[in-house]
């Protein structure tokens, strides 16, 4: 268990200065992309997010590409909530949809 905790903590966090997408330098960074390699931890993170959203009203859940897609999937499957996927970029072929899944204008959606 100690090895697991050290490994997860080491993989998830970075105490060096890290440049965020916004350009801001941060002394702390948590790389949530690594959660896919730790299923129990990913399920625990999804459970915390679901609990935090219990008082909200929404019909669908959507994970922001790409980091939040697996977390949204866990919430969707564990709680039987329909999921939609918002594409990061529009394709020039196929259906050319920006949102995959069933989503109607005006519906509420929990964005992860």
Image (cartoon, rainbow, N blue to C red):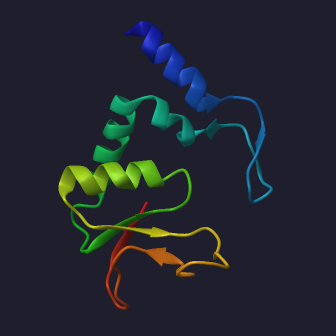
- Quadrant location of the N terminus in the rendered image: top left
In the orientation shown, which residue stands out farthest toward the top?
2
- Quadrant location of the C terminus in the rendered image: bottom left
Judge whether 29 appears above or below 53 on screen.
above
Q: Measuring 42% from the left and 8% from the top, which residue is drawn there? A: 2
Q: How many numbered discs?
A: 0
Q: Measuring 60% from the left and 30% from the top, which residue is drawn there? A: 13
Q: Is residue 27 left or right of residue 1?
A: right
Q: Is residue 71 left or right of residue 81?
A: right
Location of residue 47 in the rendering, given as x and y in whole percent from the top left corner = 28, 45
In the orientation shown, which residue stands out farthest toward the left?
80
Q: Is residue 104 left or right of residue 25?
A: left
Location of residue 103 in the rendering, given as x and y in whole percent from the top left corner = 35, 81
Q: Measuring 44% from the left and 14% from the top, which residue is drawn there? A: 4
Which of 53/66 is in front? Answer: 66
Location of residue 106 in the rendering, given as x and y in whole percent from the top left corner = 35, 91
Which of 85/57 is in front? Answer: 85
Q: Quadrant of residue 10?
A: top right
Q: Measuring 46% from the left and 54% from the top, which residue is drawn there? A: 69
Location of residue 38 in the rendering, given as x and y in whole percent from the top left corner = 43, 29
Judge whether 91 appears above or below 37 on screen.
below
In the orientation shown, which residue stands out farthest toward the bottom?
105
């Amino acid at each position: 268990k100690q090895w697991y905790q050290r490994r997860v903590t080491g993989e998830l966090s970075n105490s060096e200065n890290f440049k965020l997408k916004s350009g801001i330098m941060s002394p702390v960074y948590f790389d949530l992309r690594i959660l896919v390699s730790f299923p129990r931890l990913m399920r625990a993170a999804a459970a915390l997010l679901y609990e935090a959203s219990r008082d909200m009203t929404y019909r669908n859940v959507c994970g922001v590409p790409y980091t939040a897609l697996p977390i949204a999937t866990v919430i969707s499957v564990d709680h039987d909530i329909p999921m939609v996927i918002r594409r990061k970029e529009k394709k020039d072929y196929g259906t050319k949809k920006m949102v995959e899944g069933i989503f109607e204008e005006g519906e509420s959606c929990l964005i992860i």
